[in-house]
Every structure is written in structure tokens, then in C-alpha cells.
Image (cartoon, helix red, strand yellow):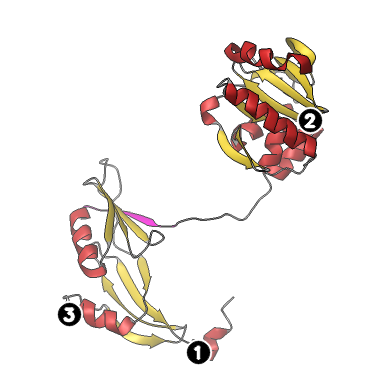
Amino acid sequence: MSKKVKVALNWLKEVLDAENVEYQIVGRLAATIHGSSREIADIDLYIRNSDVNKVLSHVEQYISKPLVHYTEYGWDLEYFQLIYQNQKIEIGLAQNTKVQSHKDGSWHPLEINFSESVIKEYQGIELPVIPVHRLVEYKRILGREVDIIDLNAITRRKKMKVNNLSACIVTEKVDESRTFYTKNFDAKVTFDCGWYLNMEFGNDKATLQFMAPQKPEQTVFNSKGLTYNFEVDDVDAEYARLTQLGNVAVMPLGDHPWGDRGFAILDPNGIMLYIYSNKEPSEEFKQYFK
């Protein structure tokens, strides 16, 4: 990013924040924040129509295009342009803005919802930015060459970052499940409204949920074909503890060539719980590890 973009952003943010003007970053800067790599030419943003005079009173000396209605480059809107230390800034009025379809020339309202803004950090500056799905929507309508470049960059398939993964079981046995897991697995109940239950197992990355059916047509878990795997440090100690508590091993404790030692019990819903500790796999199975 050029230094002038950062300087202009800091100045503009200071002006808008001082007047409590709500705004939303759009255009190329928003595309860059969401993953595009095109060089930033303009700083584009929207404000509420009712706030325009607050802004104009601070920026009059930098106006390069006056506030009027423009229809150009696939846009139909009111905006004004500033040049601040050689950086172009275009501030549009959110109400009644339209974009033109590249397919048939039809005009489509562009609704700027300030409450949807996502706070993103750009070069150390926190900015309210148009949500990526809204940006994609209007760039698909415009369909200009620059929009296609942004869309290809923004929507390019990236690896999903999964912060948590858990399973929710629909069951008539929420109470029994609560009792079973708190007693046998020292589960911590983190949410419980009676019909929906969330429990943690040692940390917030290991969770299970149980939910009572809320509609007559909602299918209840049929207890077939599901296993939860619990990795522990000492599977032999857990086997002794859980069987002492009255649980019956439906799979006996044993060593397995794929690389663990484990056993299994059932929970009140019929879910198989496989408790295991890792061990060295056999030569046969070592080849399958990636």
C-alpha cells in the first residue's frame, strides 16, 4: 500500500469519527481488504445522506468534484470527490444508489446496510467494511473487467479454517445424557436450557451437544452407525475407572494394529464411545499415515 493511501485513510477516519458519521468502505479498498491484490487508486465509501453536511464542512478545501448526481461507469448515485495529499477519495450517499447490470443494462438498487459492516484492520487502521457477500453481489452485477479481477481473487477457493467441530444429537434423553457425561467424563455443562445442552470435555475444542426434538417431524437419533472417539493419556486407567462406575465394554480393551489401544462403551443414546491412547502402528498400517 502506498503511503498516501494510509495518510488519507487516517485523516478521513479522524474527520468522520469526530462527527460520529457512520460510514462503510466499499470498492477497490474493500476488495483488497477481502483478498484482492489490485493496486488501490481510490478510497471509496458511503455515508448516510443525512450526514453529508457534517462531512462537507470539514473537507471543502479538498473537493475536486462537487456533490451532484452522477450516472457513469455503471453507477447511478450522488457523490463527491476529494483529493487529499494526492490521494483520491470518493464519498457516496447511500440512499438511492443503483448499479447497472453488464448483462442487459438494467439498474439494480444498491442497499448499503451500515449495521452489516464488518470491522477489518488494514495496515493498522480499523475500518468498517462492506461484508464480502455484499461486495460480491454488486460486483457480479457490474461485471466490468476490474470487477471480474476482484471477484476471481475474492472468491478463489481457500482452505477452510475450522475453529471448532462438534456434533449435536437430537434425542429424547437430554437429561440422561447430561447425567452420563458429567458422571463418567467429568463434562462441564456450558449451556443448558433444558431442551438444548452443550458440554465441554477438558477444553472448548472438545464439545458435544444434545437437543430434544422441537417439532413433531424432527427425526430423533436412531443410535446406529455413530462413534465418538475420545483420546486419553492412559486408556488402561480410564478402562478401570469407567467399568468400576458400572459401564460395560461393548468392545474389549485391546491393542490395535492401526496405532492405538482402546475399548468402547455405549452412552444412553446408543452412541458408541471409543476411548483410546495412541501407540506405535504396525508396519502394515504405517504406510497409510499422511
Q: Which marked residue is nearer to the observer: mark 2 or mark 3? A: 3
Q: Which residue is mark 3?
A: 244
Label 1, label 2: how far apart the Cα atoms are: 58 Å
Let me know if residue 169 is in the magenta part: yes
* Residue 112 in view: no
Type of amino acid at the residue the image marks with label 3:
Gln
Q: Which residue is mark 1?
A: 282
Where is residue 280 shown, x and y percent of the image? 48, 87
Quadrant where the image shows the N terminus: top right
Between label 3 and label 1, give the one nearer the viewer: 3
Marks 2 and 3 close (CB-CB < 8 Å): no
Choose the circle earlier in sequence order: 2 or 3.
Answer: 2
Nearer-N-terminus badge (1/2):
2
Marks 1/2 in contact by CB < 8 Å: the verdict is: no
The residue that mark 2 highlights is: 144
Going by the numbered disc 2, the residue's amino acid type is Arg
Of the 4 image quadrants, the one containing the C terminus is bottom right
Q: Position of residue 252 (x, y in %)?
A: 29, 83
Instruction: Describe the element under mark 2 as helix, strand or loop.
Output: loop
| Mark sitting on residue 85 | none
Numbered range of the magenta stretch: 165-172
139 relative position to 144: left or right: left
How far is the residue under mark 2 from the one under mark 3? Answer: 70 Å
| Disc with the residue nearer the chain's start (3 vs 1) | 3
| Horizontal side, residue 180 vs residue 281: left or right | left
Q: Secondary structure at mark 3?
A: helix
Q: Is residue 64 left or right of residue 176?
A: right
Residue at image location 80% in from the left, 32% down from the top = 41
SS at mark 1?
Answer: loop
Residue 151 located left or right of residue 224? right
Could you say where residue 11 lies in the image, as x and y percent from the top left? Answer: 69, 29
